[in-house]
Image (spheres, helix red, strand yellow):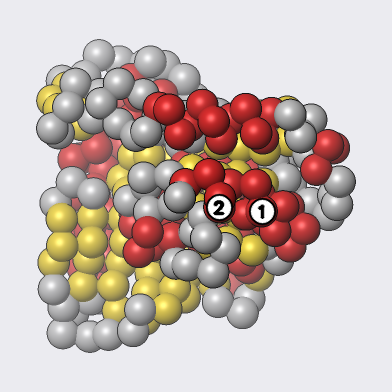
Amino acid sequence: MLREACRVVKRGRGILIPVSDSFRDVAVEAALQAGAFLRSRFGARHDISYKGSPTNLVTEMDRGAETIILDAIHARFPGHAVLAEESGARSGTEPYRWIVDPLDGTTNFLHGIPHFAISIGLQREGTLIAGVIYNPANEELYTAERGKGTFLNDQRLRVAGRRKLNECVIGCGLPHLGRGDLELSRIELTEIQERVAGLRRFGAASLDFAFVAAGRLDGYWERNLQPWDIAAGQIILREAGGIVSGIAGDDDPLKTGNVICGNEFVHAELVKILKPLGK
């Protein structure tokens, strides 16, 4: 765990900022630095621009947080490749690639809703090996390394064990103006609503993954995501004992942009319901 593995240079609400060359610890350090930047401006007014549609927002905070993260990564690992939401792809000389969303939940952030996150995933030769998701508003830090489990701050996480869909609370995405298939979404929502105890739409995909890993949600599905929405959440969910795939049940969400996750039972039930609807 972080407390055992790292030398502490700063403390905040039980979160330790490490000084280490391990991949996860560099991601943690980068996320906490960027998180402090975002938290310092949360609730203030911001300059906004748009990426292709009136609902695809980007602010100076997205760009500033991304700069902090990439500077921290490249200071330790200058040969690593990067795929980042704002600056795009950068090639590297080593078989590692960082996948970065500097501010997942920009709309929440701009509206003063304290539900947004920094998401950092790391691949080695195409396989996810580490992930960090950090919500600066409540200082919840989710971390995972391949084969070493998932933690919320220093607490080990495990997905919920419910095996009756009518007892489950399920997270989802909702398409909106200029994004997604509204008609398909309405059909999916109707099919799921009739079978579950509740539906939730929080507005930050990375934290939906994290909530399933923590057992706060029993499952989650969404379409039309980007790799930076998924990468860290995918390994965090799997290391907490969950199953994650695309809508087909055996496809890679990093390639399709579609995701279903939960424990083995919930994942299978959601695939059974949703897979036929998208054909």
x, y (%) of residue 213?
66, 53
Query: Is residue 238 among what the camera can see?
Result: yes
Q: Nearer the viewer, residue 153 or 129?
A: 129
Q: Which residue is mark 1?
A: 272
In the image, is 223 to the left or to the right of 192?
left
Q: Secondary structure at mark 1?
A: helix
Labels 1 and 2 touching (C-beta < 8 A): yes
Q: Nearer the viewer, residue 91 or 217?
A: 217
x, y (%) of residue 220?
60, 44
Q: Quadrant of residue 102?
A: top left
Looking at the image, which residue is at 30% across and 66% down? 98
In the image, is 69 to the left or to the right of 277?
left
Q: Please give the label number shown on residue 145.
A: none
Looking at the image, which residue is at 37% across and 59% down? 256
x, y (%) of residue 248?
52, 60
Query: Is residue 119 among what the camera can see?
Result: no
The amino acid type of the residue labelled 1 equals Lys
Q: Is residue 49 above or below residue 95?
A: above
Looking at the image, which residue is at 42% across and 78% down? 127
Name the quarter where the N terminus is drawn: bottom right
x, y (%) of residue 261?
61, 54
Looking at the image, which residue is at 20% across and 40% down? 64
Neighbor class of circle 1 (other Cα within 10 Å; few <14, some 14-19, many 20+) is: some
Q: Is residue 146 above or below residue 214?
A: below
Q: Secondary structure at mark 2?
A: helix
Q: Please give the label number shown on residue 275.
A: 2
In the image, is 55 to the left or to the right of 161?
left
Q: Is residue 142 above or below residue 55?
A: below
Neighbor class of circle 2 (other Cα within 10 Å; few <14, some 14-19, many 20+) is: some
Spatial separation of the CA atoms under disc 1 and disc 2 = 6 Å
The amino acid type of the residue labelled 2 equals Lys
